[in-house]
Image: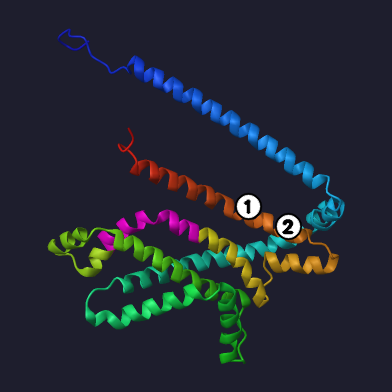
Amino acid sequence: MTTDGAPTLTWQPSTLELERRAVRKRASGRSVMVALASTVVFAAVAGTLVLTSPGWESVQRTFFNPEIAIDSLPRILEGLWLNIRVLFFAAIGVAILGTLLAVLRSLRGPVFFPLRALAAGYTDLFRGLPVLIVLYLVGFGIPALNPTERYPAAVLGTIGIMLCYSAYVAEVLRAGMEAVHPSQRVAARSLGLSHGATLRMIVIPQGLRKVVPALMNDFVSMQKDVGLISVLGAVDAIRAAQIVQAQTYNFTPYVVAGLLFVALSFPMIRLTDHISARMASREQIGGTV
């Protein structure tokens, strides 16, 4: 009731809307049950095929030995801590260098052509080179310039990862910046903002929101590729697993290292999927009938 005694009207869904919601709820429940049943059947069939294969016992001893897994876990965890540190510093370097390259490629005017060409050549080169080859070139090329100095393998590996992934991130950022409508730049310049201020306050924030899922996927890929620094001699999780494997003649340590990398990447993978789904739902608001 209002102050003058008139009844207050509140919105209530219609009978048709309630029926639609009930139908959608029943359909969703059926979908969940079908998905659960199909998953159980698939797991049962796959498990039966694997467990009844002639070589399963040998594979179990060679790849899934619980005693060797427990014994090797502390050394692999110690190596994984090195991977995490390399990932932390590489992510910071990639963010800075990738943003700088994206800005250079977005510069307007013929006077900036040398900078644009340099940034384009950099991204083309390191997007085309395999990460493993870049690590070899950096890990053995930089020490060759000054043989009297010793450089930590982890530092050289971090540099190699930065060189490769900054090229990937730069192209993703540039795509997001170019997706911003030109009217945003014109409006910002008409308000008196400089080119740098326009990029910093208008273009980059809007472009970044458009490419967040792609950037997070690059970060997930970088989480895996930090394991490649083992080729330079760094005792990370992969090299620790290799050392244990050479001592035991068993491949279980590799399985342990792989599971640890999955555990390291899983939160970011789920976060990427969540953000992608949320952004897709926002874009589709009002677009469904």
Comparing 243 with 45, the one in front is: 45
In-image side of 247 versus 30 (left or right): right
Residue on which the image places disc 2? 255
Task: Name the residue at 45% across, 70% down.
Answer: 166
259 to 164, vertically: above or below: above
Identify which residue is drawn at 40% across, 68% down.
Answer: 170
First to last magenta residue range:
200-218
Residue at point 78%, 45% (across, down): 49
> Label 1 belongs to which residue?
263
Element class at badge 1:
helix
Q: Is tag 1's residue or tag 2's residue first in the polypeptide sequence? A: 2
Residue sitting farthest toward the top? 5
**Numbered disc in front, either 1 or 2:** 2
Residue 217 in picture, x, y percent from top left: 49, 57
- Percent position of residue 10, x then y: 27, 16
Tell me the quadrant of the picture where the C terminus can be found: top left
Residue 16 image label: none
Residue 150 x/y as whole percent = 62, 85
Pointer 1 local density, CA inside 10 Å: few below 14, some 14–19, many at least 20: few
- Cα separation, mark 1 vs mark 2, equals 12 Å
Task: Name the amino acid, label 2.
Answer: Val
Q: Main secondary structure of the magenta part?
A: helix
**14 relative position to 25: left or right:** left
